[in-house]
Every structure is written in C-alpha cells, then in structure tokens.
Amino acid sequence: MRQFRWKLMDVMKRKYFLKIEFRIQILNFFKKNGYLSLLKKIYCIFLISKKNNYSSLSKFNNRCLLYGRNYNTNKQTNYSRFVFRKQIDLGFISGFSKSSW
C-alpha cells in the first residue's frame, strides 16, 4: 500500500483543486472589481490567502504512468526517461529513434 500512497495523495489533491477552483476564480473577480468597496476587496484577499496548499495547480507533480517517478518525466507521454526509452526500443512509440553520437 505504501508504494501507491503517492497516487492516492495525487488524486486527493486534484479532487480538492476541482472543488475549490471555481470559488477562487469568483474571489479573484471580486478582488479586481472596481465597483466594490475597499473593505469587501480586502475580505476577498483574506479568503484567498486562507486557501489550502492543495488548491494550487502548480503543486501537482507530473508522474510516470508505470513507475510513479516524478523526476525526468516527459510531459507529452507521461513516462519517465527509462520507460520512454524502453517503449521506443520496443517500437510502441513511433517517430523516435535511438540517438548515437
């Protein structure tokens, strides 16, 4: 179970982000609105600052689909460099060739 803990945490973070994303967008709209009073704008800024760390999309890690590694992950294929190279060698991903110099 420990090896799949990263996957459970990632799913939890993404669900929380989707839940709170619309609320944050509304608060940002009110913060930039020119017709609201300064007190209401400050209150919106206060609510935005109280949000949880999981509510930011930049906190998510791109992980490999097979191994779960978050380092050296290709964003287009969602594979780590080891899996990506192995898939290319086996011919599962077309358009790439093994480089040599």
Image (spheres, rainbow, N blue to C red):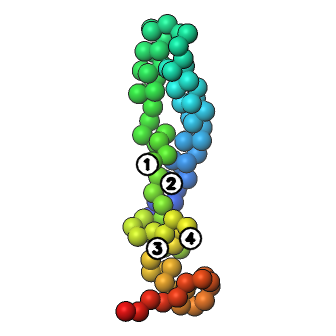
Disc nearer the start of the sequence (2/4): 2
- C-alpha distance separating marks 2 and 4: 18 Å
The part of the image, by quadrant, that contains residue 38 is top left
Observer-side mark, 2 or 4, equals 4
Disc nearer the start of the sequence (2/1): 2
Q: Is residue 71 above or below residue 98?
A: above
- C-alpha distance separating marks 2 and 1: 10 Å
Q: Is residue 90 above or below residue 25?
A: below
The residue indicated by pointer 2 is 10
The residue indicated by pointer 1 is 59
Q: Residue at x 51, y 72 (%)?
A: 79
- C-alpha distance separating marks 1 and 4: 20 Å
Three-letter amino acid code at the position of disc 3: Ser
Residues packed near mark 2 inside 10 Å, few (<14), some (14 to 19) or many (20 plus) = some
Q: Residue at x 55, y 10 (%)?
A: 35
Q: Secondary structure at mark 2?
A: helix
Three-letter amino acid code at the position of disc 2: Asp
The residue indicated by pointer 4 is 77
Observer-side mark, 2 or 1, equals 1
- C-alpha distance separating marks 2 and 3: 17 Å
Cβ atoms at labels 3 and 4 below 8 Å apart: no
Q: Residue furthest left?
A: 101
Three-letter amino acid code at the position of disc 1: Lys
Disc nearer the start of the sequence (1/4): 1
